Image (cartoon, helix red, strand yellow):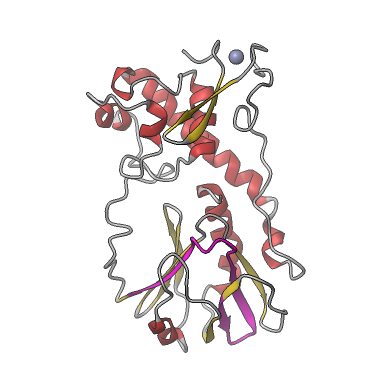
Amino acid sequence: MPELPEVEVCRLGISPHVLNNKVSKVVVRNAKLRWPIPTDVQTLIGQTVKSIDRRSKYLLLRFDSGTLLMHLGMSGTIRVIDKSTPVIKHDHFDLQFINGTTLRLNDPRRFGAVLWLDNHQDELGLLSKLGPEPLGDDFCYGYLFEKAKNRKVPIKTFLMNNHIIVGVGNIYANEALFQAGILPTTKAGAINESRFNKLTDIIKQVLRSAIEQGGTTLKDFTQTDGKPGYFAQSLLVYGRAGKECITCRATLLEIRQANRSSVYCPNCQQ
Ligand SMILES: [Zn+2]
């Protein structure tokens, strides 16, 4: 599943190709994504991309009359190709520009989204209830501690709650808690302020380094002979249950929390 770093790398990868470029054609091959692709995406024809932002895992292409919101869901990828590139299975949506450049969304599982926010109005409320961006200034010392007061929910579940903070998915929650030495089952409200501040720094580091690693694969966005995979990363605990902890060589354990895998070191995480 694409997580925040993949979406940010996607934003960085597509921006130089589509920024200030004018839309010439919108192709919807299959409108049945998480929500139906609305017919008013056709109003984009003749409009120019003014900026490309990201909020949580939503890509936001800004035009004068509104915002095109795109989400990669569970399995979506976006390629930058020429409009003449043959269509492959699950290529559901194209945004074609006057110079022939095309943004093409491929999404086998169709949990992704393409929505038009007319006049930039977020009528579904997808963006309005989100917590702060982990790499933004609003996610600062004291924030998690304040939000966690009296909360009995496990810290891992707490971190993955989009209303608390966006973009800390399962992989990065596992990695950050390992690096911070916090057991994923610890009640959020039982963690003191200095440990939360350390965790805040680590979350930012973990996400920044993932974005940097992904940046080296930017060329994949213009591959025409296939679709870009999500980038490989050096992960310390995620996907390593039963293997040795890189710090103390104890065996990493795995439990299920909120139906997601949590991998941790029983020694290093207390
Ligand atoms: Zn360990």
Residue at 22 percent across and 23 percent down: it is: 150
Tell whether 235 sits left or right of 156.
right
Task: Answer with the quarter of the image where residue 250 lies.
Answer: top right
What span is in magenta? 93-117
Residue at 53 percent across and 54 percent down: it is: 74
Residue furthest toward the right? 225
* 250 up-or-down from 120: above or below: above
Magenta stretch, main secondary structure class: strand
Please tell me in which quarter of the rendered image ligand 1 is found: top right
Residue at 68 percent across and 18 percent down: it is: 244
Task: Answer with the quarter of the image where residue 89 lies.
Answer: bottom right
Tell whether 21 sits left or right of 35.
right
**Residue sitting nearer the eye, 224 or 241:** 241
Residue 23 screen position, x and y as percent: 52, 84
**Residue sitting nearer the eye, 187 or 97:** 187
Task: Answer with the quarter of the image where residue 127 lies.
Answer: bottom left
Residue at 40 percent across and 68 percent down: it is: 35
Residue 69 screen position, x and y as percent: 42, 67
Is residue 62 in the magenta section?
no
Tell whether 161 sits left or right of 52.
left
Residue 257 screen position, x and y as percent: 44, 30
Residue 176 screen position, x and y as percent: 50, 29
Residue furthest toward the left? 150
Tell whether 259 sits left or right of 164.
right
